[in-house]
Image (cartoon, rainbow, N blue to C red):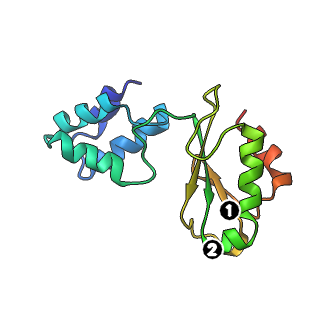
Amino acid sequence: MSYKEIIAKYADKPGGIIEAYHAIQREMSYLPIEAVGETAEVFKVPVSQAYGVATFYSMFSVKARGKNIIRLCESAPCHVAGAEEVLAALEKELGIKVGESTADGKFALELSECVGQCQATPVLTVNGKPYFEVSPAKLTGILAEYK
């Protein structure tokens, strides 16, 4: 489905810009700048406002990135529980650093603030799905679900 078709589905909904952006990002893994312009036109807002929404929220990206978005929580409880070791293992396994995507376009690696699961640290999410008590040893199995 094209971003134009997605935007049109939300054109008459209150809060539709954010819903449209979520839907576009589920389809494309990011918000192409052309989609931001189209959103401004459909929702009758200035491009600067549509772009502001797209760049304000950390879950949105206007930069192309890997299909599967891995976010590792960097809050204090996750850090104390070993998030730094998990991050090092992720970077080694994927061959990328935070903010980058794999060459095959399958994965993007990002950091996140608290995801509200401090009882099971460290926590990472892949496309919003949480994984608890993550260790370097568990990463191969988690990543295999998305390869």
Label 2 environment density (alpha carbons within 10 Å; few <14, some 14–19, many ≥20)? some
Question: Residue 88 at what x, y percent from top left?
Answer: 74, 52
Q: As drawn, which residue projects farthest toward the right?
A: 137
The amino acid at mark 2 is Ala
Q: In this view, does 70 lie above or below 86?
A: above
Q: Is residue 8 above or below residue 77?
A: above
Question: Is residue 56 something that shows in the picture?
Answer: yes
The amino acid at mark 1 is Val
Q: In which quarter of the image is residue 20?
A: top left
Q: In this view, does 129 lie to the left or right of 4?
A: right
Question: Residue 77 at what x, y percent from top left?
Answer: 66, 74
Q: In which quarter of the image is residue 25?
A: top left
Quadrant, the C terminus: top right
Q: Which residue lies under the disc numbered 2?
A: 76
Between 27 and 133, which is closer to the camera in this rendering? 133
Label 1 element class = loop
Mark 1 → mark 2, Cα distance in angstroms: 12 Å
**Residue 123, which numbered label?**
1
Label 2 element class = helix
Q: In this view, does 118 lie above or below 137?
A: below
